[in-house]
Image (spheres, helix red, strand yellow):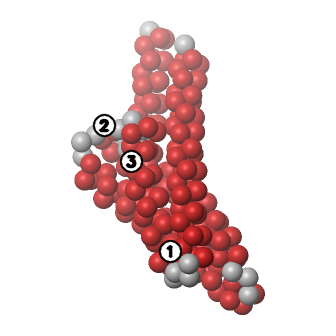
Amino acid sequence: MFTYIKRFILHQETLKVSKFTIIGLACFFIYYFIFISLLALKFNAIFVTVFAYVVSAFLNFILNKAWTFKNKDKKIIYQVITFFTIHGSCLLINIIFVSIGLTFAKNLKSPFLIVIFSLFGDAMASIFSYLGNRFVIFSSRGKNIIINKLNQVNALKKDSIK
């Protein structure tokens, strides 16, 4: 029975990671569509990064709250503030990489480097984003869900031994 419970918990976590990835990829394409389109229109790269990030982050919040984590918590203001604080940090990570890309692009005369550096920054920000979404924003009552699940498994294990 203990093995079945561990598999069930692992399946639930895998399902959440899969949903988070699907939403992340959708928002990623939305972000880059906006990013590349506005860069092509000669908008400032930092402005483009911020604007595209805010649009994709807003969609990301709504979809992850409703579908990935099925979070019905009424503390929406707390969640939005926490979400945008974490995603603001992700944006900062991305801006740092875009700025580095701008420097290399000017020196090497290759504007495509901005996109490559932005992609790398986005990858780093995505890891930080998942951890923040999973364990801070959408966790039940601010508690670490994995620890709660392991405590439940340990309790069931103790009950089965008795």
Callout 3 environment at 10 Å: few (<14), some (14 to 19), or many (20+)? few
- Tag 3: amino acid: Ile
Q: Residue 152: where, in percent of width, then height?
A: 42, 25
Q: Are marks 2 and 1 in contact (CB under 8 Å)?
A: no
Which labelled disc corresponds to residue 86?
none
Residue plotted at (55% across, 50% down): 26
Q: Residue 24: where, in percent of width, then height?
A: 54, 50
Which comes sooner in the sequence, label 3 or label 1?
1
Q: Residue 48: where, in percent of width, then height?
A: 50, 74
User: Dot 3 lies on which element?
Assistant: helix
Q: Which residue is mark 2?
A: 72
Q: Which residue is mark 3?
A: 62
- Is 43 displayed left or right of 84 in the figure? right
- Tag 1: amino acid: Val
Q: Which residue is mark 1?
A: 48
Which comes sooner in the sequence, label 2 or label 1?
1
- Tag 2: amino acid: Lys
Q: Nearer the viewer, residue 61 or 134?
A: 61
Q: Are marks 3 and 1 in contact (CB under 8 Å)?
A: no
Residue plotted at (57% across, 63% down): 33
Of tags 3 and 2, the one toward the viewer is 3
